[in-house]
Image (tube, rainbow, N blue to C red):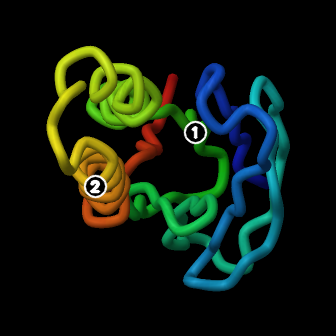
Amino acid sequence: MSVKITRKTGWIGLLVSVKIRINGDKVARINDNQTIEMELPTEEAMIQVTQQGFRSNKLQVKKGDKLMIQMRKSAKIIYLLMSFTPLLSILFLSGYEHQFLIGLVAILGLGASLFLFNAYTITKIP
C-alpha cells in the first residue's frame, strides 16, 4: 500500500516542483495540481516538502494516508508584500535619500521570514 499526495499551492511557486522528503531523504518531486502515489519504506514514516529553502511541517504518515500540500495563507501574504514592495517604496518613499535601501531591506526581511517559518503545510485528508 502507498500514500497518495496532492499538491494545490496555487500560483506561488507554480513553475518549480516541490521536493518530497521521507525520513529526511529526497524521494520525489511534485508539481502544482498533481497527484502522485508513493510507497513508504516502512509502515510509518515522517514526510516533509521543501522548495528552494522553503519547507513544510513534518507529518507522521502511514500506508494508505491521503495527503494535501498547500501554501500557508501567511506565506501568500508575504509573497504578495514582497512583490509589491518596490511599487510601495516608489509611491510612499519617493524623495527619501535611502529609498532603494529601505525597499531592499524590506524585501530581504520578508523573504527571510519565509525561511524561518513553514511556507507550506501538509495535512491528511479523508
Q: Which residue is mark 1?
A: 67
Q: Work out whether 23 lies above or below 96.
A: below
Q: Quadrant of residue 79?
A: top left
Q: Residue, x 56% and y 33% (percent of image)?
A: 68
Please provide percent x and percent y for residue 1.
79, 54
**Quadrant housing residue 117:** bottom left
Percent x, y of residue 55: 47, 60
Can you tell which quarter of the image residue 112 is in?
A: bottom left
Q: Is residue 104 left or right of residue 26?
A: left
Q: CA distance from mark 1 to mark 2?
A: 42 Å
Residue 34, position as x, y percentages in the image: 82, 30
Which is more toward the observer, 124 or 14?
Answer: 14
| Number of numbered callouts drawn | 2
Depth check, front residue: 88 or 109? 88
The image position of residue 123, as x and y in percent, is 43, 38
Q: Nearer the viewer, residue 82 or 6?
A: 82
Circle 1 residues within 10 Å: few <14, some 14–19, many ≥20:
some
User: Comparing marks 1 and 2, which lies closer to the viewer?
Assistant: 2
**Front residue of this view, candidates 14 and 6:** 14
Residue under the point 59% across and 44% down? 65
Q: Look at 73% across and 77% down and name the residue there.
A: 26
Mark 2 neighbour density, 10 Å: few (under 14) some (14–19) many (20 or more)? few
Q: Which amino acid, mark 2?
A: Leu
Residue 72 visible? The answer is no
Q: Identify residue for label 2.
A: 101
Q: Which of the two discs, 1 and 2, labels the residue nearer the N terminus?
A: 1
Compared with 84, 59 (above or below) is below
Q: Give the residue type that dot 1 points to.
A: Leu
**Secondary structure at numbered mark 1:** strand
Task: Tell me what residue is drawn at x 41 percent, y 43 percent.
Answer: 121
Q: Is residue 29 visible?
A: yes
Return the mark for residue 105. Answer: none
